[in-house]
Image: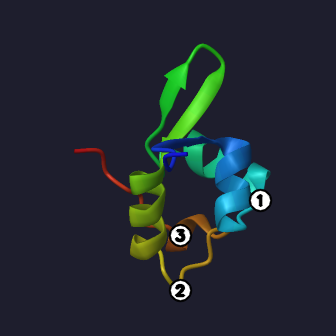
Amino acid sequence: MAEKIALTVEEAADFTGIGRNTLRQLIRGDMIPTLKIGRKVLIRTEDLDSFLVLNRNNNLRNPAEIQPLRQN
């Protein structure tokens, strides 16, 4: 089976260990780019990896410390 290129919020939470609610707050705050299909929200694994690298050593529950991932 091929590796997924996008994950749901639940899958992204399992993949990263970040809580679903924290991920949803990051998405609402436009910190992580997403793709919305109807009610489903997908996060590209590439974007998720980049966001985590960009915010290494930052507290993701403190908005002042979060560096948003800008869409290209």
What quarter of the picture does the N terminus occupy? top right
Q: Secondary structure at mark 1?
A: loop
Residue 55 picture location, percent across and down: 47, 74
Q: Residue furthest top?
A: 38
The earlier-in-sequence mark between 3 and 1 is 1
Give the mark toward the camera: 3 or 1: 1
Q: What's the distance in space between the residues labelled 3 and 1, CA to CA?
A: 19 Å
Report whether 13 appears left or right of 34.
right
* Residue drawn at x 50%, y 50% as measured from the top left: 3
What quarter of the picture does the C terminus occupy? top left
Residue 70 picture location, percent across and down: 31, 51
Residue 69 picture location, percent across and down: 37, 56
Which of the 4 quarters of the picture holds residue 27? top right
Task: Say few, some or many: other residues with alpha carbon within 10 Å of mark 1 (under 14 / 14 to 19 / 20 or more).
Answer: some
Q: Residue furthest left?
A: 72
Q: What's the distance in space between the residues labelled 2 and 1, CA to CA?
A: 17 Å
Which residue is tagged 3?
Answer: 64
Of residues 49 and 3, the one drawn nearer to the viewer in this rendering: 3
Report whether 29 appears left or right of 25.
left
Residue 9 picture location, percent across and down: 67, 43
Label annotation for residue 19: 1
Amino acid at dot 3: Ala
Amino acid at dot 1: Gly
Q: Residue furthest bottom?
A: 57
In this view, 59 is above or below 7: below
Q: How many marks?
A: 3
Label annotation for residue 57: 2
* Residue drawn at x 47%, y 52% as measured from the top left: 45
